Amino acid sequence: MKIKIYVGKKMTTLSWIFLENKISVRLPGFADAKYSNERNIIVASSNIGLIYIIGIDGEIKYEFSNAENENYKFYCLANTKYNDLGVNIIMAHDPELNGERFWQHTIDLENQAVGEPLTKWR
């Protein structure tokens, strides 16, 4: 599923086609989104500190914090084939971790948390 992302000054609009209908969801701040083939959901994250789990019908199922650690901040999302969600969150570390700023982290839906750094992201 292709998700179009429109970033405004204070909001981000995500849109996609579901059953021949255009679905739109507005989120506060800058946001990124990826479709999870494995779970048939949309995973979105924003710079205001939240991860959103969105049904393909546009309903926000739930949200949780992506900002539990003050040493890293949300940067973007990336598809992956190495976990059952199919999406990782990329966090910018400050200070750098092992000489690298950007790291991939898992998104743990069961515990509604961002996991520890997995691997460098480039």
Image: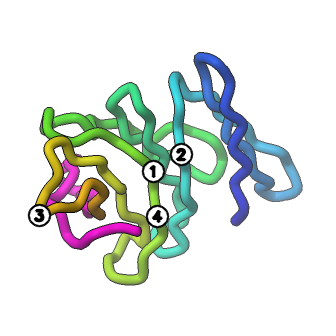
* Residue 109 seen anywhere in this rendered image of the structure: no
What distance separates the C-alpha of mark 2 from that of mark 3? 26 Å
Label 3: state its secondary structure.
loop
Q: Which residue is mark 2?
A: 32
Q: Nearer the viewer, residue 23 or 82?
A: 82
Q: Is residue 111 above or below residue 103?
A: above
Are discs 2 and 3 less than 8 Å apart at CB? no
Per the rendered image, the range of residues in magenta is 105-122
Residue that appears at 29% across and 47% down: 92
Residue that appears at 66% across and 32% down: 7
Q: Amino acid at mark 3?
A: Asn
Q: Amino acid at mark 4?
A: Ala
Find residue 36 and report its horizontal and vertical position in percent.
Answer: 51, 66
Find residue 42 and report its horizontal and vertical position in percent.
Answer: 54, 54
What distance separates the C-alpha of mark 1 from that of mark 3? 20 Å
| Mark 2 or 1, nearer chain start | 2
| Mark 2 or 3, nearer chain start | 2
Q: Residues within 10 Å of mark 1 (few under 14, many from 20)?
A: many
Residue that appears at 42% across and 65% down: 87
Q: Nearer the viewer, residue 32 or 41?
A: 32
Q: Amino acid at mark 1?
A: Cys
Q: Which residue is mark 4?
A: 78
Are discs 1 and 4 less than 8 Å apart at CB? yes
Picture quarter with the C terminus: bottom left
Give the tally of numbered discs: 4
Q: Amino acid at mark 2?
A: Asp
Q: Which residue is mark 3?
A: 98
Q: Nearer the viewer, residue 53 or 5?
A: 5
